[in-house]
Amino acid sequence: MGTYHRGVPTRRTALLPVFVATAALGLAACSNDNGAPPAGTSGGGQSSQATSAGSSEAAGNKTPGSITIMAGGDIFTNELPMAQAKKDAGGKGYDFNPMLAGLKPIVSKADLAICQLETPLTKTNTNLGYQKRHNSPYQLATALKNVGFDGCSFANNHTYDAGLAGMKQTREIMKANGLQLAGPLDSADEPANSPGGQVAWYEAKGFKVAQLSYTYSADNLQLGNMTHTPADAPFFKQNLFMVRGAQGVIDDAKKVRAEGADLVIVSMHWGTEHKMTNDDDNAQMAAEIARSGAVNWIVGNHPHVVHGCERIDNMIVNYSLGNELSDMGTQWGFPPQSQDGIAVEVTFTRDANGKITPSAEKYQPTWVDRTHGYRIYVVPKSGGSAAIDPTSYGRTEIQIHKAGNSCDLTAIS
């Protein structure tokens, strides 16, 4: 939130940090939604079963094949969703599984699934977020894993809501649950030349995928200041797209390609909240990035309403996927579209010459029922649950086609 005032484990494998034993212990700690918080550690490297993304073996893969990648909208919690999660856990801890369960049919079928995490996570479940300050129970990560996500972007205007300590805990909690996190570094001790801060690496279907994450601001107390970084986190500048510019994003994409990425996904936290169309400067930046040929897909979020998408040369850009889970709704003065979102999927196909081409993108509308437990529903054109707002599907269709549909976005159901 915050206001941007500018105009099956065999199915896919995340390239996890080297401390596999530590991560496994943390994952075990998270296996029970109401159990002890994960210990987790931060570090770099690879899992024991995955090839290093920087190896020569990984570079220049020309084996024909295809991979289907799914992306979702903003996921964040406030006081009422957290209260519901506590109720769903019987008052002992927090359980977000009932809220997210409706996403599983669309998320779990993809070869790789990524989300937009717009909240830090806490190991102690104390100092939880309120109003426009976000900080969520660690059990949210467990539910994200259970529904089928492999990782998330984390560069957004709430990244710093719980300070550097919150950022470190978030990464440790995600790691302990087997989830990647793309976004700002946690410490100046980490490599200063790391492209786009912390890169999320994934491996699935013979493809190595790098996810980069950028935002207009990482500090929600500095609204409107798109170059500010906290005194203890100057390295945030690596993830501010107004500081880096399109060329900075392109340079980062080229670096991860040199390290072995077959596909590069760029998560962008941009646009204007609740504006029904994307901003012109975002479109200009997307066009410049597309011309470089270094990025395959830009996934945008932050406006909290669904926007359309474009196909520019060989790159897909989604300007906003809306809200996947939030407390926004007409009761608080937000537009009804803030309860809508889309899960999108693209299949990337590699031919014998190594050329990778995206398919026409597909989308599945979703809707959050705020008044009955914050349940997320997949919204088909017809035949959906009686609990779904009957106007949600139509609203989403209007948003998708409002500015054209050059990426040929088609509904899954």
Image (tube, rainbow, N blue to C red):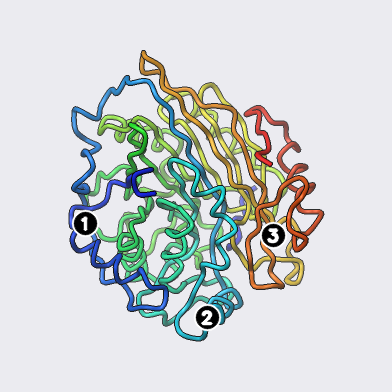
Q: Position of residue 207 (x, y in %)?
A: 35, 32
Secondary structure type for disc 1:
loop
* Residue 277 left/right relative to 299: right
Which amino acid, mark 2? Answer: Lys
Would you identify the image quadrant in which residue 29 lies? Answer: bottom left
* Residue 156 left/right relative to 78: left
Q: Residues within 10 Å of mark 2 (few under 14, many from 20)?
A: some
Residue tagged by mark 1?
A: 43
Which amino acid, mark 1? Answer: Gly
Q: Is residue 36 above or below residue 51?
A: below
Tell me which numbered mark, 2 or 3, is placed earlier along the sequence.
2
Q: Position of residue 143 (x, y in %)?
A: 46, 64
Residue tagged by mark 3?
A: 339
Residue name at image x 37 percent, y 20 percent: 64
* Front residue (pair 404, 343): 343
Query: In the image, which is nearer the foreground, mark 2 or mark 1?
Result: 2
Secondary structure type for disc 3:
helix
Residue tagged by mark 2?
A: 86
Residue name at image x 22 percent, y 35 percent: 54
| Quarter occupied by the C terminus | top right
Instruction: Kindly indicate whether the residue at mark 3 contacts the one at mark 2 (C-beta within 8 angstroms).
Output: no
Instruction: Kindly indicate whether the residue at mark 1 contacts the one at mark 3 (C-beta within 8 angstroms).
Output: no
Query: In the image, which is nearer the foreground, mark 2 or mark 3?
Result: 2
Tell me which numbered mark, 2 or 1, is placed earlier along the sequence.
1
* Front residue (pair 207, 55): 207
Q: Position of residue 98 (x, y in %)?
A: 56, 68
Q: Residues within 10 Å of mark 1 (few under 14, many from 20)?
A: some
Q: CA distance from mark 3 to mark 1?
A: 37 Å
The residue sitting at the bottom extreme is 91
Q: Is residue 287 above or below residue 199?
A: above
